[in-house]
Image: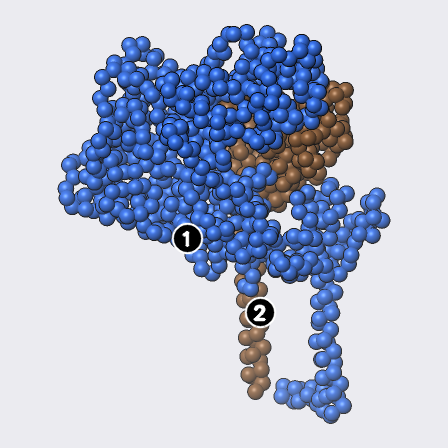
Chain colours: A blue, B brown
Amino acid sequence: MKANLKSLWQKLFGDSVRAFGVVSLVFLLSLAIAPAKNHFSEWRHYQHGYLKMIRNRSEANTLQRHFRGGIQQIWLPELGVVDRCTSCHVALKETSLTDVATQPFRAHPVIPHKLDEFGCTTCHRGQGAATTVSEAHNSTLAWEQPILPAKYNESSCGECHRNSQLGTPVLNEGRAMLARYGCVNCHMVKLPDGSTMKATDDPPSLSHIADKTTREWIYAWLKDPQAYATTATMPNFKLSDDDARDMSAFLIANSTPLAGDSVAVSGKAAADPTAGASLYGESFCASCHAVQNAAGNVVGGNVGPELTRIGSKAKPEWLQGWLKNPRIYDPTTAMPHYRFNDAQVATLAGFLEAKADSDLLGSIHLDSATPEQIAHGKRLVSDYGCASCHEIAGIKKPDNFAPELSRIGSKPVTQLLFLPGMPHTLPDYIAGKIKQPRAFSPGLKMPQYIFTATQIDALTTALLALNERANTLPPSLTVSAVPETNYQPAGKAGKLMTDLACFSCHRINGHGGDMAPDLTWEGSSVQRQWLVDFLKNPNTLRPALIRRMPRFNLTDAETNELADYIMTVYQSPAVDRDSMPLSGYSQGDIELGKQLFYGKYSCQGCHIVDTKTDKGYIGPTLTHVGSRLTAAWIYQWMKNPQALRPGTVEPNRAMSDEDARALTAFLISQKGGGKQEVAKK
Amino acid sequence: MTRDCWSIVILFIALTASLTTSCSRKNASVTLPKPTAFGVAVVESSGGKQVAQTGSLLPQPVVVQVNDEQGNGVTGALVQFESAAGVSFDPPNGLTDSSGQFTTNVSLGGMAGRYQLTAFTFDKSHKRIDLVLQEIALGYQQTLGRRLNDQYCDRCHNPESTVERVSNYDNLEVKPHPFTEGETLNKMTDADLTAIITYGGPALNKSALMPAWGNTLSKTEIQALISYIRAVADPPSRNSGPIYAKN
């Protein structure tokens, strides 16, 4: 054995010439590794595959001409992008290859950006500089961010686009949810523009809760909010019976009475058993509040809380006080102050109190609370951060109760604790945490939300967009959001508009809801007498709408105050309402307008002028439009509706002045023959 | 010295061997539930021809039913789903319930186009029985088109009314074509569709009830709408791209 080895050594390195030869050979072989590795590289394999594939296609010559062999690279210093993805994905720009299903040869689908200007990893993540599939697509020891799963793609849009865009519905939904479900009450989210994300869920104050409801209801609610209302935004804190008992004890003991929030009205409820339902319908409560129907569907708006079991919650006197004037209990509520008379309050309260569920509280029996229980309840209320969302007398709103999420989308994977069996990626971690927060540790305080899988994907998308790059992009590369203004109307009318909660539905000067029309230019648009009549008795303008303006039972003085303010202040610089008369148009113009209405422009597809023949259901009914709108507004609207109300559905027909004039003459002559328009049910 | 050499060589071999085995750890074999019954056919109960964004969950689950010779549901038959890479099923297989049905939630793949899902079961003689379904994944452009459709087109072009959105279809003297109506819309070229959207019905000698949108929608938006119309057409348009199925 030893002898064999010795002879081998002799053969190879016996003298200097042999030794030199052998060492040279070894060097040569090791040097050959690099070119060989290159020759057998993955990208070369794919490029050969591509050339083979295009050979048999009819446009082979064109494709061949476009093809560039070798390592390809998109280098964008400003974005920090070095992407070699196009070395394998060779045909991203070949629009003729839309029928090719095999990757990496698919053409890139149409997007609003040029690949050369944005690269690939800007949107898809992954390791751009890598030239093998596994290194480019997956996470490696040196590279944490794998390719982003397609369902989260819109998060990349959100790094630059801070505004809501039509093409990114998932991102928009996720961002709205962060505010709507109060996530940002506990988790601070500082947006890259320096502002802090604000919640839109408006949780009620608990300082006077004993006026409103019972300890039993609080107990049931704390145990399972969705058992009371399936659409409740409050999450489930998975409290033990004892903890819920003590917290409810504390909240009741801590509550102080509020003068005037509960009243026993002297009026008698209407004798007719259907009167309550009628009043609920006429007041369009369903525009904001939902009720679960017999089939289990939740029907109605989501501005206010669901009322399916309101009778099990609200004390009768409190409910009557609330219906009489909700602003006494909650000065900032989105609920309008209806001017109901006592009989109406009694009728409506009776109707709502009947919406009770005996199963909800039937099995709950709480003994009167001991001081220890109350003290324990107080500790729990501050431990669970209840005051992050709710105002609670004696408990300060905690600062940064939960981890800040401003850069959650860049959290290093090494800092995350994954559940067993969970893929080790950031999106999976975020989604898992939202889905089942307590699974990560039973001691965690984050409550259980009831989200669908689609909602979790949307939230994860929005959170992934909050990352390092979004925070460090130069401002020139970002598209900023239009911030909500804090516009408040002034004076007496302003107070009245706050009292009626106009901004819960209407938007004015960039502030308010989107359920009802934007009123920024209402003063240029409508005639004063129509506005007065409408405020007194709102009727529907659009036959197919189910959400409508309620009647607030305003006094004449209040109506005039509002009408004067709207007519004076909300005027568009583009429409001079006195520039065109409301009558006196020639019969010829009117006739021409009619022909244009029914012929060239076929407006009857969407509007009704003659109730006998027209059926259009989309735009407002125009039978009385001559008594409603100003002629100048109609004319400008004909010329360009989007200029007056961006986003309106009515198409811009680019009418000539003559056509617009004739149509204005025709429409302004539609005064409804003196008949009053009646609200359709 | 030689013994050292040999021991090093042996150690090296052992290391390599252990590394290779650990790396090529065999995939945990999928354990399928054991069927207690067998059917002769798989039929769709609901969930075919749905539309969702790429990579995302279909709005409704896919429900299939296993039937016996009489067409009655079979309880306890094994149903499995398969499709192209990137499509995921939750759960991917299982036994039919008491009404003979099996329900799964489907997430589509990352590329826009049509995805072919296959649900299959085995009959008594272990013969495989397939049911093929198709679902539609929308990319960025089609998603934009879909939003525009919701905002501007759907009220007239979709005959179905909901409580929240009452259709105007029945009010129109000349009926618009629903965008799923492939027989008609597939015959129209992109240029035709662009013309009718931009200049209105009269541009193609059709009803003036279809207004001109050329001053309201941008060219990009009109292209997005057309790509959406192509994506949802039934039967499928020739331009709707490849169909992704299990290779």
Q: Is residue A623 left or right of B190 when viewed as pictured?
A: left
Tag 2's secondary structure? Answer: helix
Give above or below for B110 relative to B102: below
**Mark nearer the viewer, 1 or 2:** 1
Query: Mark 2 highlights which residue?
Result: B16
Say which residue appears at 64% left-offset and 60% top-offset.
Answer: A77
In which chain is the residue bearing label 2?
A: B
Percent position of residue A265, x then y: 24, 19
Secondary element at image label 1: loop
Amino acid type for the residue under numbered disc 1? Glu
Q: Residue B72 versus residue A7: which sits nearer the camera?
A: B72
Q: Amino acid at mark 2?
A: Thr
Residue A433 at x, y = what percent? 43, 48
Q: Which mark is residue A404?
A: 1
Q: Is residue A556 visible?
A: yes
Q: Is residue B158 visible?
A: no
Return the x and y of residue A190 as percentages of the image width and height: 45, 51
